[in-house]
Image (cartoon, helix red, strand yellow):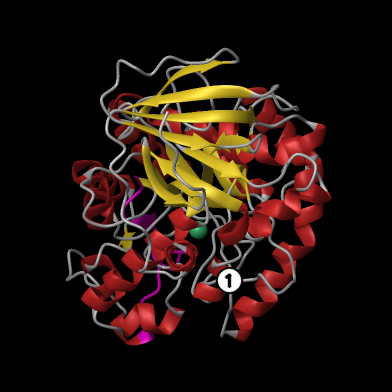
Amino acid sequence: MKFAAFMIILGSCIPGQTQQPQATGNATLFLNVRVFNGKSGSLTPTTNVLVKSNTIERISTSPIDVSAFKNVTVVNAGGRVLMPGLIDAHWHAFMVSAPQMLLMTANPAYLHLLAARQAEATLMRGFTTVRDLGGPVFGLKRAIDEGVMIGPRIYPSGAFISQTSGHGDFRFAFELPRTLSGPLSHSEVEGVAAIADSPDEVRLRAREQLRQGASQIKLMAGGGVASPYNPLESTQYTEAEIRAAVEAADNWGTYVTVHAYTPRAVRQAIAAGVKCIEHGHLIDGPTAQLLAAKGIWWSLQPFLDDEDASPLVNPVSQKKALQVFAGTDNAYRLAKKYNVKTAFGTDILFDAKVASRQTAQLAKLVRWYTPAEALRMATAANGELMALSGFINPYPGKLGVIEEGALADLLLVDGNPLEDIKLLEDPARNFVVIMKDGKIYKNLLPNKQP
Ligand SMILES: [Zn+2]
């Protein structure tokens, strides 16, 4: 018995050794939980939560009758905190753990296997949903949704669309010049990037991603850090080019989000009709005000010059990273000051060890927010952002909240994260139950029949 419990703990910590989903049958009953519902600043009194199939069926302080169900898993939570599964609004499942040069040169099948392993680790950190902002993840998403692999729900963008010399142009110098209608570069063939110049090409590339199941379109609208061939200050694409993608997305019920750091790049994208800005660390007050006035989402990351920064081999990139780090404080201050709709994401790249700190990145938001505000951002707020995919939403239903009718993505926490957000830094220990889509992927508590 002791050995079995030990194996369960071990299984939850070692990637690849994750418990297979337990046969939950028809229902799971969480007995005696205090709920952080994703929105409220405080916990509920002790209550019971019933999950039927993949949905939160009932929340009640009175006993819930489960006699109608054939198979019921009871989680006797002993007053622990039940909260919504975490959502990372800026993720790259394909690129999170492999070093940059490996990504550009290694056998793609090998890279996809690394990505699958990392997807499992992501779920086991408590992230039940990610919005993937670039990379070939349609296959991974399908395998996870079919239950072949273990991982979070993925809102895929497919290839990120970039102009020549833009943030998504990772071609080697010897690949230039490209002849018009010339052959695609390696990263384009693999579905990492789509290099497009002119509104027509952007439209084509956007539609290609939608055809493959993209839930939103990602464009590179300004300079970036990891790409050495474009200044951080550069504005990328023209309004007409961005608008072509916006029209293609809008016709499909969804939206365009853009990578942009500077006020000018952000403003051009806003004028073209995008609904979300990724990063924006260098923007100014009036531009933040514009985001607020237009109800545009600001998907911000706590980029700081600390041990959690993604590794960059290129000195040009390292210098650009420092410029971005210097803007982080100001960006969060502006987001708060003007009450911009703010999403939480990590954008971790190129390193499995940095990726293992995904939840610690969220805990860092207490530099600017209360724990409740930080958790709300990574749950209810991010869930609202996921819903922007409209009628092509791959997971229709409410995410990021605990309420009757919402999708059952749940974490049971050993401790109160509203009081001690540092609990998040050790998900292997402190997330004692992880449920996604009504299935339990981890349970450190002993089972008890009703
Ligand atoms: Zn990114």
Number of residues whose C-alpha sits closer than 10 Å to that of mark 1, classed few (under 14), some (14–19) or many (20 or more): some
The residue that appears at 35% across and 60% down in the rendered structure is 135
In this rendering, would 273 be left or right of 345?
left
Give the dominant element type of the magenta stretch: helix, strand or loop. loop
Query: Given the current orientation, which residue lies at the most extreme front position?
Result: 1
State the residue at coordinates (52%, 33%). 400
Whether residue 335 is visible: no
In which image quadrant can residue 66 be found? top left
Residue at 72% of width from left, 48% of height from top?
Answer: 283
The residue identified by callout 1 is 354
Quadrant where the image shows the C terminus: top left
Q: Is residue 359 above or below residue 397?
A: below
Instruction: Find residue 226 and report its horizontal and vertical position in percent.
Output: 54, 72
Q: Which is nearer the eye, 169 or 119?
A: 119
Position of 155 compared to 201: left or right? right
Q: Nearer the viewer, residue 447 or 107?
A: 447
In x, y percent, where is residue 157?
35, 48
Q: Position of residue 175 (x, y in %)?
A: 29, 81
Amino acid marked by disc 1:
Val
The spot of residue 106 in percent (x, y) is: 29, 83
- Left/right placement of residue 28 relative to residue 314 reads left
Q: Which residues are magenta?
A: 155-173
Mark 1 element type: helix
Write down the quadrant of residue 438 in the picture. top left
Residue 417 picture quarter: top right
What number of labels is visible? 1
Instruction: Reply yes or no: does residue 414 show up in magenta.
Output: no
Q: Is residue 108 above or below residue 147?
A: below
Q: Residue at x 36, y 54 (%)?
A: 151
| Magenta-drawn stretch contains 160 | yes
